[in-house]
Image (tube, grey):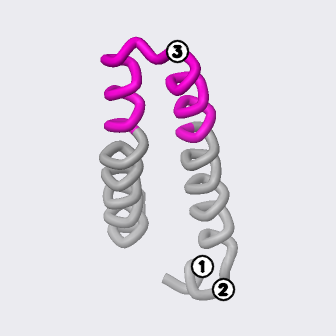
Amino acid sequence: MINPDIESWALARAQTIVLKEGLNLAKAAQDLDRKRSRLLVYELRKVITAAIVEAHAASLTPEATQR
């Protein structure tokens, strides 16, 4: 079962990523700016990867395993 704290964190993190990076990407796509769209897709990948690494690292801390 998923820890409610981790689930809440993941939902909040996903919302932040989509609001910031997703909206920027949508705007670039709407403007038909392919170069900016490619850059923003790369940036979105980086942010998602960083969030996954952060969640994984947090799951390995002693505080997370004691719950």
At label 3, the amino acid type is Arg
Residue 8 lies, in percent from the top left, at 32, 64
In percent of width and height, residue 41 lies at: 55, 29
Secondary structure beneath dot 1 equals helix
Which of the two discs, 3 and 2, labels the residue nearer the N terminus?
A: 3
Neighbour class for label 1 at 10 Å: few (<14), some, many (≥20)? Answer: few
Location of mark 1 (residue): 65
In terms of image quadrants, where is residue 3? bottom left
Q: In the visual, does 55 lie left or right of 32?
A: right
- What's the CA distance linking mark 2 and mark 1? 5 Å
Region in magenta: 22-44
User: Which residue does the image show at 42% across and 42% down from the upper left?
Assistant: 21
Look at the image and say whether residue 25 sits in the magenta stretch: yes
Q: Quick one: label 3, few (<14), some, or many (20+) residues within 10 Å?
A: few
**Residue 60 placed where, x, y %?**
69, 72
Residue type indicated by callout 1:
Thr
Q: Is residue 59 above or below residue 41?
A: below
Q: Main secondary structure of the magenta part?
A: helix
| Figure quadrant of the N terminus | bottom left
Q: Nearer the viewer, residue 57 or 34?
A: 34
Residue at x-position 38% and y-position 65% = 9
Which residue is denoted by mark 3 in the rendering? 34
- Residue 67: percent from left, percent from top: 48, 82
Residue corresponding to mark 2: 62
- Callout 2–callout 1 Cβ contact below 8 Å: yes
Which element is circle 3 on? Answer: helix
Identify the residue shown where x is 41% and y is 30%. 25
Foreground disc of the pair 1, 3:
3
Q: CA distance from mark 1 to mark 3?
A: 44 Å
Upstream in the sequence, badge 1 or badge 3? Answer: 3
